[in-house]
Every structure is written in C-alpha cells, then in structure tokens.
Amino acid sequence: MSKTQKRKLVRLFDTLAAGPWQPDAGWQDERIKKNCGLVAAAGFSEKVLPLACVAVELLQQREPDTVRGIMYACVSVGWLPDTTAQSYGKIQRILDTLRKRGVVPFKWIVDNVRATEKPSSWSGLADFADTVATAYRKDFWAALLDYVCIIVEKDTVAGRISPVTREYDVPLHPLRGFSSTSFAFSIADEWREIKKPIHAYYIGDHDPSGRDIERSIRERLAELSGKEFAWKRLAVEPEHFAQFNIIPLEPKRRDSRYQRFADKFGDRCAEVEAVPADALRGMVEEAIKSHIPAAEWARLQEIEAQEKQSWNEVMRGMRGATG
C-alpha cells in the first residue's frame, strides 16, 4: 500500500469515527477495516467514500435488502439527510459500483422475486435423476392444522422476506400495488380448496395508498373466496416509528384517501423499506412459527429425510440403468 493510500485510509477512519453512527464493533474492528479497505480500492471520491463504507456495513448486517432499504438505513443512522430521489440515486450508484467491483455480492441486493422463465430440460435421464434426487421436498403443511400465507404490497418487499418463506415452504404473494381481479381470484381460487383455517399475514406501506391497498385486497379475497380467514398486518404499524427509528414521511394531502388515513393514524407515513430487512424477516418467521408445533415439525423432517434416502436409492438405480 502506498503512502498516499495509507493517508487516505487514515482520513477515512477519522471521518467515520467523527460521524453520527458507529457499528457495535467500532470502525477499528479488523473485519470492518478490511471491508473499508476494499471499498476504498473501488475508486470512490473521498467525499463519497465514508457513505459507501457505512452502506456496506449496514448491508452486511441486513442482507438481502433493497437499494431503497439501504437508503432508509443510511437516513436512520444520520449518514443521509432525507429519502429524496437524490439520496436514492446516491446509494444506487454506490451499490452498483460495489457490485461491479466485486466488493458486494450481487445476491445481497434484491429488487423483486421475478425469475427468468424457461421450460425445464435435461441432457438425459441421468441428468434428470440427479436433479430430482435433490429437488424433493415434503409438504409439511399438509399435516399441520393451519394454512398460512404472506401477502405483500411490493415485489421489493417479497425479495427481502423470501428467504424465510422459502425455508418454511409458505406461499408468498406480491401484489405490485392495487391488485387486479385476476390476481385476487388466483389466490381466492386456491383458498376455496383449503379445508383448514386460513391465516393471511400482510406487509405494506403505512400511508393512505398503502392502507387502501390492504383494504382492497382483503375485501376482494373475502368476496371472491367466500371464505372466512384470519388477517394480520405485520408492518408497517405506527409503533414501528419509535421501534426502528423511522423518519416519518408526510402524506400527500391531495390524495382522496388522505383524510380517512389522517383521522385514524395522523400525519406520519412510512414505506416498508424503512423497516430493517432483518426485522421484517424476524416478524415473518415469528408469525409462521406460531402455527408450527416444534415436535411435529421435527417429526416431519425425519420422515422427509427417510423419503429422500429411499428416493435417492431409486435414482441411483436409474443412473446405473442409463449409464
């Protein structure tokens, strides 16, 4: 490392130490110092470099998260002044550079849960056998007393919590704003076939539009499914402002839904991205686990392991027959 680079790092850590937020381990922690060195080598100007280091540390604590989520995190710890488009653009450029330079893994930043669509295909039966051998997963919920699903207002929220819903094999429905009748019908059609109590958990913005989106989908599902179901909003709730140090946004007073929102909740608004991603995942996991008897889940895991072993033996025979 050159003398110029060393002086740059000294100035960087002086700036970080004098800043409004410190990691629990402190900026002189060896892991954090190493990360900051990698960030410094990515080519940022000295003006932007401290914010980039803060963004990396926050992202490492919360990944996977969205660009908007990290912007809110930087605002909440005092390293950005507001949640304007200018602040978003600054964080977006920083994270783009960090990913392109290999400092931050691409998978740490999620935008939605869309995936490239391609029909499944294999090079032969042996290749198919290898895939099937690792793909089997038992439907634990078929043996449990409740049906659970998570409904979220945005794709970006789905991307933040999908690691939990995948782990527990729970349906995740991103609305992408006000849902179409066809989308609501697809959920309702599934619910009509369910013979057990249905528990839906919702995550959406706390503002006139976000609250109305929740009302709309809930009413549509009741109408189209003809079923009774439990409904609980996980986030954003008014108590989350203090809990997560959320900086309130002002509602759009010209919004036709403003007065109804203001009469009930007041003037403080917040987007879901203001809630830390790890906190959202914790809420979702807690909600799901409240419907899972621990002993029964463990028993089902044992059954799944036995079934996988039996199936793998069949697959090994298949590979031998086609080898």
Image: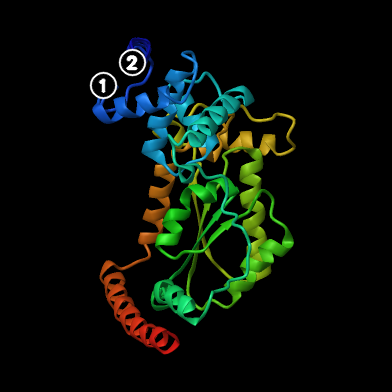
Choose top left, top right, bottom left or bottom right for residue 322.
Answer: bottom left
Left/right placement of residue 48 relative to residue 19 reads: right
State the image coordinates of residue 285 (x, y, percent, origin top left). Answer: 39, 55
Please, is residue 111 above or below residue 185 in the view?
above
Colouring scheme applied when the structure was drawn: rainbow
Number of numbered discs visible in the structure rendering: 2
Left/right placement of residue 62 relative to residue 250 reads: left
Q: Residue at x 64, y 56 (%)?
A: 217
Q: Disc 2 marks which amino acid?
A: Phe
State the image coordinates of residue 171 (x, y, percent, origin top left). Answer: 51, 64
Could you tell me if the residues under marks 1 and 2 are in contact, i.e. CB atoms within 8 Å? yes
Real-space CA distance between mark 1 and mark 2, rounded to the nearest whole angstrom: 8 Å
Q: Which residue is mark 1?
A: 28
Helix, strand or loop at label 2? It is helix
Please, is residue 236 above or below residue 91 in the view?
below
Choose top left, top right, bottom left or bottom right for residue 311.
Answer: bottom left
Left/right placement of residue 104 relative to residue 312 reads: right
User: In the rendered image, is residue 113 in sight?
Assistant: yes
Helix, strand or loop at label 1? It is loop
For mark 1, does the 10 Å Cα neighbourhood hold few (<14), some (14 to 19), or many (20 or more) residues?
A: few
Please, is residue 241 above or below residue 164 in the view?
above
State the residue lying farthest toward the front: 323
For mark 2, does the 10 Å Cα neighbourhood hold few (<14), some (14 to 19), or many (20 or more) residues?
A: some
Q: Which residue is mark 2?
A: 13
Quarter in which the C terminus is drawn? bottom left
State the image coordinates of residue 216 (x, y, percent, origin top left). Answer: 67, 53
User: In the rendered image, is residue 239 in sight?
Assistant: no
